[in-house]
Amino acid sequence: MCGREGIGVMVTKAELEAEVAALRRQLAEQSAATNTATSQKQKETTEAEEKVGDRITDNFEAWSTQLEDVLTELEDLPHKKPILFALGIFALGYLLGRSR
């Protein structure tokens, strides 16, 4: 304590209070540093989650657009190319029939 070592050395109340104040100051500094680091990590985590959410939304919109395009093409196929459509249905029926 306070640089004094040995048995039987009396420490004054003022020295103890000064040491306690120094320890409290160190504890407050450590607590502030920990809180800053924790809030920074939370901020980074939140930003990363937002980026992932944005990518998922963008990918979903892209897939949705592509699915709509494919469905539109499939709806128009019997009218645009009826022979190809009939051959495709025949081939599909044949394959399903052979699979049993």
Image (cartoon, rainbow, N blue to C red):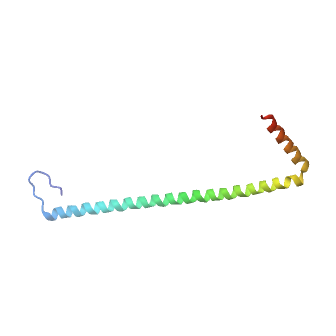
User: x, y (%) of residue 24?
Assistant: 26, 62
Q: Which residue lies at the image location 31% right of the left edge and 62% below the top edge?
A: 28
Total numbered badges shown on the rendered structure: 0
Please indicate whether residue 33 sits to the left or right of residue 73 in the image.
Answer: left
Residue 53, picture quadrant:
bottom right
Tell which residue pokes out farthest to the right in this image: 83
- Relative to 27, is 80 on the left or the right? right
Image-based side of 62 in relation to 25, left or right: right
Residue at 43% x, 61% y: name it: 39
* x then y, percent, for residue 47: 53, 60
Q: Residue at the far left: name it.
A: 8
Question: Where does the C terminus fall, quadrant-wise?
Answer: top right
Q: Nearer the viewer, residue 26 or 70?
A: 70
Residue 31, how many percent across, how many down? 34, 60
x and y percent of residue 71 in the render? 78, 55
Q: Is residue 17 above or below residue 91?
A: below
Quarter of the image where one finds residue 12: bottom left
Q: Quadrant of the N terminus?
A: bottom left
Left or right of residue 73, residue 62 in this image:
left
The residue closer to the viewer here, 94 or 30, is: 94
Residue occupying image coordinates x 73% and y 58%: 65
In the image shown, does 6 or 66 lie closer to the viewer? 66
